Image: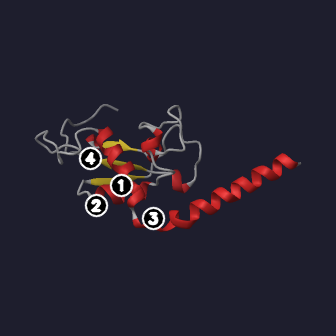
Amino acid sequence: MAHLTTNPADKERFICVYPVYINSKKTLAEGRRIPAEKAVENPSCAEIRDVLTAAGVNVYVENKMHPREWNRDVQFRGRVRVQLKLEDGSLCQEKFTSRKDVMFYVAEMIPKLKTRTQKSGGGDANSQQGEGGKKSKKKKK
């Protein structure tokens, strides 16, 4: 469907940000759009929304799937629409001139969310050890 409107403030003209775009676990072929070292591990729509809302940007979440996301799980579902420009075509915020700017910003801020900092403290180390243990057991067999 062609855009019914050229008004940048219209919801249809908001840019789309799928969690896949900033997921460090994904390859470029799987839909990641920023360098892996700047990406976030399995970001959720809620996290993207929280970060952008806190930044004062106009956002809303849609229950859509990225076409290359094979996992139909709820945590991978969703797409965030972000308003970059006002009705007159000027930017809503100077720091967000393009969708890339938004992606980099979100990827930078998600690790700083309270929900992340609490979890990642002990959780990551333990999960890595667990995986390591499993791997070595497989080798012994």
Q: Is residue 64 left or right of residue 137?
A: left
- Residue 54: give its label: 2
Residue at image coords 29%, 41% = 101
Q: CA distance from mark 1 to mark 3?
A: 11 Å
Residue at image coords 47%, 40% = 36
Amino acid identity at mark 3: Thr
Mark nearer the N terminus (1 vs 2) = 2
Mark 4 neighbour density, 10 Å: few (under 14) some (14–19) many (20 or more): some
Name the one closer to the observer, 139 or 90.
139
Q: Is residue 99 left or right of residue 27?
A: left
Which residue is labeled 3 in the image? Answer: 117
Mark nearer the N terminus (3 vs 2) = 2
Name the one closer to the observer, 15 or 12.
15
Q: CA distance from mark 1 to mark 2?
A: 10 Å
Amino acid identity at mark 1: Met
Q: Secondary structure at mark 3?
A: helix
Quarter occupied by residue 9: top left
Quarter occupied by residue 123: bottom right
Q: Secondary structure at mark 1?
A: helix
Amino acid identity at mark 2: Ala
Which residue is labeled 1 in the image? Answer: 109
Residue at image coords 42%, 44% = 38
Mark nearer the N terminus (1 vs 3) = 1
- Residue 24: give its label: none
Which residue is labeled 4 in the image? Answer: 11
